Image (tube, rainbow, N blue to C red):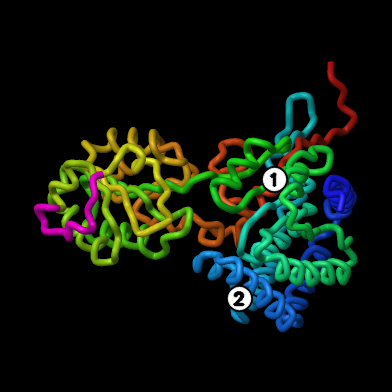
Amino acid sequence: MDIEAYMRTLGQQARDASRQLAAASTETKNAALLAIASRLRDHKSALLKANAADLAQARSDGLEPAMVDRLTLTEPGIENMAAGLEQIAALPDPVGEITDVKRRPSGIQVGKMRVPLGVIGIIYEARPNVTADAAALCLKSGNAAILRGGKEALHCNQAIAACVRDGLLAAGLPATAVQVVDTTDRAAVGHLITLPEFVDVIVPRGGKGLIERISREARVPVIKHLDGNCHVYVHSAADPDKAMAIVENSKTQRYGTCNTAESLLVDRAVAAEMLPRLGAMLATRGVELRGCPDSLAILEAAGIDSAKLRPAEESDWSEEYLAPIIAVKVVDGLDAAIAHINRYSSGHTESIVSENYTAAMRFLREVDSASVMINASTRFADGFEYGLGAEIGISTDKIHARGPVGLDGLTSQKWIVFGNGEVRR
């Protein structure tokens, strides 16, 4: 296969389809989403068979158990995919929304209209449900999509793609509105991210190495985040019970997600009271605490299992562990906490636990991250939890989209003008 020619063909087909999608009515797009959901349910056996082939190959290749788990598709998982499509169909259509209309002294009215980005390339690993989720979000927001999943999910992704094509055709939309790359050749990615004439934005979903490569080599804009080094700061005015619940959930609900807390900051004013409780809770749940000298002294004096304690190194303050490990530091008040976070955070999600309104609002204003929270678990940094219905990913960039990226994040705005014969004088 001539990979370059193949990817250019996909790009041209996507560009042509994007113009039809941009003009499609909400009713037509919703009809396609519901048809795809129906096809997924109807072809459940075929999807499971394709997934079984992927799983057999993954085990043969010696993939890690965590990767095999992410790759596994079950009957409930298929139902969740279908239900997710129906939920996206029920969401308001952002395309064509007109806002901020104001009359100018000249007599014209100036406003903004929300429009699709055009063609979105999505590069992802493992989870086959991303194929359905990404297709649905792009479709509802009026964008054509080129999806390049990982080689470990090739059979399942192609089976899902067949359901997507059937649903698009059933609604009278071009099958090329959503295309899944059918080669595992890594060169396909290199060509996809260097086709600015066909692709308007790239969304990578995967490990840090993949995202770094795409960010470095892409010739089209990229919506991405590299790390999820999220912080919980227990302020001097924290409610102890809230702090316990928030730290526990932020760190231990799931270890392998980008919105899991990786760093715990405790105000010196309450460290002697709070750190022993927090440390005992985390150690009991199997979490290793990598602490500064002050935090280790408090934890050791409290009798925390020494096997769960380790001196923190400089690299720990910026580490995304994705594991039962957390960095712990005692800080001298709000200013020190904000300075530490703004220096070491990846800009993803940070939370303060405090009953002091003034301190909490300062934290909101001055912490420079995509999501900043008061008295809530970092695990809420998610498109579904934010009411977006679903997300294409999370962005730590500051231009265009920041935080969980849903339908609005897959659109842009253009200026529109209403006139009645006015001319500029």
Is 71 on the left or on the right of 185, as rendered?
Answer: left
Residue 88 in percent (x, y) is at 67, 65
> For mark 1, what is the residue?
202
The mark that comes first in sequence, 2 or 1, is: 2
Spot the residue most to the top: 425
Amino acid type indicated by mark 1: Ile
CA–CA distance in space, label 2 to label 1: 26 Å
In x, y percent, where is residue 153?
Answer: 67, 66
Q: Is residue 395 left or right of residue 372?
A: right
Q: Looking at this view, is 287 or 75 the one in front? A: 287
Position of residue 234 relative to residue 73, above or below, is above
Q: Are marks 2 and 1 in contact (CB under 8 Å)?
A: no
Where does residue 245 sit, x and y in percent of width and height?
30, 62
Assign a secondary structure to mark 1.
Answer: strand
Q: What residue is at 53 percent from the left and 42 percent from the top?
A: 396
Q: In this view, does 165 lie above or below 202?
A: below
Q: Hey, what amino acid is under mark 2? A: Gly
Asked whether the viewer can see residue 364, the reply is: yes
Describe residue 38's horizontal placement relative to residue 324 as left or right.
right
- Circle 2 residue: 77
Per the image, is 306 magenta? Answer: yes
Q: How many C-alpha atoms fall within 10 Å of the one at disc 2: few (<14), some, or many (≥20)?
A: few
How many residues crowd around disc 1 within 10 Å: few (fewer than 14), some, or many (20 or more)?
many
